[in-house]
């Protein structure tokens, strides 16, 4: 369950994220294979040096060659894959993933997994607003945070190997959070912000406003361009936490609304000053 | 009431915006004067070539020299200034402004103004998250929209002169809107977005999340750094419209929330697809 220069790495799901992992590892000299649904994805990966082998049919003969398996699939596909093919893993293989929610995925996978292999959840906080292997690039990891979400089932050795994977990708900081802490953080920083951007983008027919639009509206709606299949699944898998974060936001938004409605200028200014102060903290650390 | 190369221009209020106007005009060879509260502001303007003269005390002798007067003041100060000093204007002077709300300002100023001078409202959609003459630069007008908000009291000649001011500043597009249309547009694109950013920034103690923060949260909170004195005044002066825009947003945010709560994946995906489609329109036109 170690990660070293001899490790053979299998990427399951060769999209934007899986392809970016593949490129990062291949460029560092690792042997990288892939499982993808379509042959043209494999062909692209081979032609562009992302992988040295790849299959569209999962076979024991292919899968058992690998020491590290990275799952870059939608959550429900990931769990189905484990149920269907885990017999093919060789004993001692280390599994990890890139899934954007953790509590609903990590414990489920660990509960159905064979005892002689180990899964350590991970989430590279990197991405782009586009999808598909053709956009894959190791550059998305530059400056990114890589979060490992171990549980009490994980061994120190496997957790360390998973962190080493993040460092090898080129991520800037490697952090550890519990699955619950991860989901609370991601519910706030990522899922809530996407809900806000989507709501702002659809709340009004706005095409005629293009000529007046400045940076504020563009900044707040950049992430309204969203992969609906993936994000709707991630939202539902983190539903309780996301609803809690949405309610926290609504509470403050309604508080500000009532200050405005009641001409309470001091209330407005207090909340603006707090926002300015807190935002300053994020500037400094940028 | 024309704007031509001989026009002498007075800037009242030499902050970020007034100073930027002053620099743009001075660099094009116009004679530019200024009224400011503090001598050090005038000194800075003189030393840095923004103005060729400036005063901290308003006198008839100084004010009556100018043909064009640009008010870059907070709204209530602007109206007070007109009431107090409009006797000093020479007949036929053209007044304009930079105020971020229009309906509550334009009609009020026009209603108290002498008959032999004319005020045409304007709003250069440019700015920075900092304030003060030291940040003034004509570069803020590059690519910016400049909106003229005439009323039935305005003459064609004065409206054209006001548009020419926008072109001289270097703004990209010159548009005309009624004060009401302007305020609806600004309530949505600018004020609502600032309300959202402020609410998101204060809804949770988030400093410990700095290490996990990616682009989404930073983008959505950039404008949470806000001049509370100015924005609280602008919000209240556009209260009815802003509350309407806030409610439009809340309605969609709550709709998305209920899809999530009810596991209505199709509802979520529909709204996300609409957001993606609409946002695409803004990308193309960027």
Image (spheres, coloured by chain):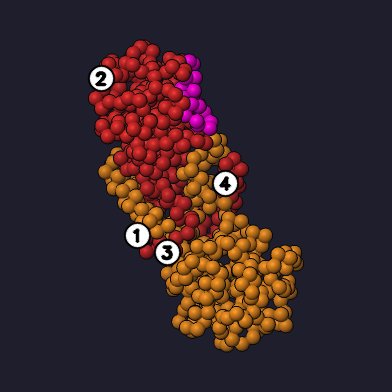
Chain colours: A red, B orange
Q: Are marks 3 and 1 in contact (CB under 8 Å)?
A: no
Of the residues under marks 3 and 2, which one precedes in the sequence? 2
Q: Are marks 3 and 4 on the same chain?
A: yes
Identify which residue, B4 or A149, lies in the foreground: B4
The furthest residue to the front = A47
Q: Residue shown at 73%/65% (left/top)?
A: B47
Mark 2 or mark 4, earlier in chain: 2
Instruction: Name the residue carrying label 4.
Output: A279
Circle 4 Cα neighbour tier, 10 Å, few/some/many (<14 / 14–19 / ≥20): many
Q: Nearer the viewer, mark 3 or mark 2?
A: 2
Badge 2 is on which residue? A59
Q: Report crowding for label 1: few under 14, some 14 to 19, many 20 or more residues within 10 A (C-alpha).
A: few
What residue is rendered at 71% in x and 73% in y? B52
Residue B189 percent coordinates (x, y) = 45, 59
Residue A205 numbered mark, or none: 1
User: Chain ID for label 3?
Assistant: A
List the residue tagged with mark 3: A211
Secondary structure at badge 3 equals: helix
């Amino acid at each position: 369950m170690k990660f070293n220069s001899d490790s053979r790495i299998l990427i399951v799901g060769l999209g934007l994220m899986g392809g970016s992992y593949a490129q990062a590892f291949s460029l560092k000299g690792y042997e990288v294979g892939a499982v993808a649904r379509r042959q043209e994805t494999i062909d692209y990966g081979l032609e562009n040096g992302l992988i040295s082998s790849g299959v569209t049919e999962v076979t024991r003969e292919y899968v058992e060659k690998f020491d590290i398996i990275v799952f870059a699939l939608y959550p429900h596909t990931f769990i189905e894959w484990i149920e269907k093919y885990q017999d093919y893993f060789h004993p001692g293989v280390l599994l990890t993933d890139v899934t954007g929610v953790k509590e609903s995925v990590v414990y489920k996978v660990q509960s159905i997994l064979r005892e002689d292999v180990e899964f350590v959840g991970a989430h590279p906080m990197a991405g782009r607003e586009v999808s598909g292997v053709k956009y894959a690039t190791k550059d998305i990891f530059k400056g990114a945070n890589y979060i490992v979400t171990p549980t009490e089932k994980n061994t120190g050795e496997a957790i360390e190997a998973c962190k080493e994977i993040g460092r090898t990708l080129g991520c800037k900081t490697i952090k550890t959070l519990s699955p619950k802490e991860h989901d609370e953080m991601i519910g706030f920083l990522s899922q809530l912000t996407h809900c806000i951007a989507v709501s702002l983008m659809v709340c009004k027919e706005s095409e005629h406003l293009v000529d007046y639009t400045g940076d504020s509206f563009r900044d707040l709606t950049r992430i309204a361009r969203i992969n609906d299949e993936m994000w709707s699944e991630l939202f539902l898998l983190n539903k309780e936490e996301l609803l809690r974060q949405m309610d926290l936001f609504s509470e403050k938004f309604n508080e500000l609304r009532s200050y405005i409605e009641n001409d309470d200028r001091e209330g407005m200014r207090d909340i603006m000053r707090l926002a300015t102060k807190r935002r300053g903290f994020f500037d400094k650390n940028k």
